[in-house]
Image: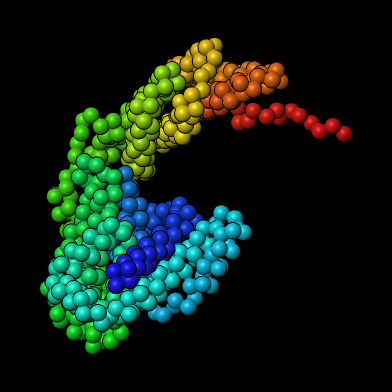
Amino acid sequence: MRVTVTLTFLDLAGAVALLLWGVRMVQTGVQRAFGARLRGFLGGALRNRLTAFLAGMGITAIMQSSTATGLMVTGFVAEGLVDLVPALAVMLGANVGTTLIVQVLSFDVAAIAPALILAGVLLFRRATAGPRDFGRVLIGLGLVLMALHQFVGVLAPYENVPFLRLLLGAVAAQPVLDVVLAAIFTWAAHSSVAVVLLIMSFAANGTVPPDAAFALVLGANLGTAFNPVLESGAGDDRAARRLPIGNLLNRVIGVAVALALLPYIGRLMAAIEPNGARAVADFHTLFNLVLAAVSFPLLTPYAVLLRRLLPARVDPADPSRVMYLDPLARETPVVALGGAAREALRLADVLESMLVGLRDVFERGDRRQLAETRHLDNVLDTLNTAIKTYLTGLDPEAMAEADHRRVAEILTFALNMEHAGDVVDRNLLGLAAKKIKRGLVLPREGQAELLGVIDRLIANVRTAAALFVTEDARAARLLAAEKEAFRDIEAHATSVHFEWLRAGRVDMAETSSLYLDTLRDLKRVNAHLVAAAAYPVLEGKGELLPSRLRQDGMEED
């Protein structure tokens, strides 16, 4: 008997694991195939609360994860790109979106599981990246259907076991306990879809009564709201946590009201839909629709309340904190442009700190310095976004032609500084990490040359910052000439690299290749500096040619 019970629990655990894995395959497949486009679509839909609600519902229905949608829109709010009201509308739509796939799976569609898996495997094995990801989605859907069918099959022989009936009956008599248990399981599983599907299986077999199943559904809806709060990555910034906490409070209130009305709701749902699984799916959808309908008109005052409860934390030591973008100065564009220019200069300071950190990593191989330098790229991204948002909010009719030109210069400077930081973060620090991980040692001459090039680049950052303020043509010519200097440095290093290869110096091949890749990326950073500060000045003074190609070349007959 013990062996049989053990095997049964293993079968149940295996079915649950298969269900969770299938849901995860669907989510990852959709994210890999459409993740960037979905994020862009969501960002464009956040103009008002209605389109935001519909976008949240659609994206969540496709991704089968309100948590993923919540994290995307939380990032938008934290960066100041979207107001809190449409963001809250997205979360209401996301909560409704999770019910759509449950509605589809509430019908008996297990028979198509083998066909879905077969089609998914064929796409996954034979197709390119996009169809491969869609094949992953089909495989995940097939596994979900198989897991549900297996779960029902395992439970069927035990429906009338007295001990199981007694245990589930005791749990079912405590709706609050049902809510707590389902919330914990949903938080652990990171998927309300999977948990609601399991509840449907219980209800279909009569293992739990309808009221208990509905209470479990309420717990699943509550548990899924914890994940965005815990995974938002907002740290101690209370303002950035307004959205996930607001969504959680909304769910708590809704669950409390529904729990109080559960005896009446249970009788109504049983009269409308006698099928247990369908009743669970319909209750899940109805709860989220009613909660969205009640909350939608109250989003504006609710957002005001959240701002009062969770005020923005001001940390003077935070390098990403905006210092000179005064909202009141927008009424006077010349003052606002001065503040934006001062803020843009901070980007040069952060980029210089990144290059100093990069130099230390190459010189001493300090892993801690590597991590700290990577963090500075987030500072660049935050400041650049704040500057763009501030400048695009100025009234174009209140600005003169010189003001428009200065806006373009500030945006060009900030954008190139941010792109230069991306090269340092994604490329140069990656090469430094590779050097440390593989224990590569540059020759003494090569090490000195590399550190010298980084020092030269740091000096060019300072020149670009000064040039952004003074707009001096002589300094602009000197900075522009650095492109040719860096090109010569790279050409010389390439020549030495190939000489070593021809000489059979295999021991130097990997080290030399790392050195060459580093120089190329340093040259890219320098090109961004020139584009940020030198080219706008030279173009304004008519000293920049429209093209470096010869215009007097003629085809030979």
Instruction: State the residue at coordinates (19%, 62%).
Output: 250
Of residue 440 and residue 496, the one placed in the foreground of this image is: 440
Q: Does residue 212 appear in the picture of this structure?
A: no
Question: Residue drawn 31% across and 58% down?
Answer: 190
Q: Residue at x 15, y 74 (%)?
A: 170
Q: Give the image location of residue 276, x and y in percent.
A: 29, 81
Q: Is residue 540 above or below residue 311?
A: above
Query: In the picture provided, is 271 more to the left or to the right than 506?
Result: left
Out of 142 and 229, give the one closest to the viewer: 142
Q: For residue 91, what is the image quadrant?
A: bottom left
> How many marks on residues?
0
Q: Nearer the viewer, residue 7 or 510?
A: 7
Left or right of residue 394: residue 245: left
Task: Give the percent coordinates (x, y) of residue 253.
Answer: 15, 64
Asked if residue 250 can be seen in this view, the reply is: yes
Q: Is residue 142 above or below residue 223?
A: below
Q: Residue furthest right?
A: 557
Residue 14 percent coordinates (x, y): 38, 64
| Location of the N terminus (image quadrant) | bottom left
Q: Tell me which corner region of the image, top left, top right, bottom left or bottom right, holds residue 467.
A: top left
The residue lying at 18 percent from left, 59 percent from top is 249
Splitting the image into 4 quarters, where does residue 327 fall?
top left
Way the structure is coloured: rainbow
| Image quadrant occupied by the C terminus | top right
Measured as percent of width and height from the top left, residue 544 is found at: 57, 26
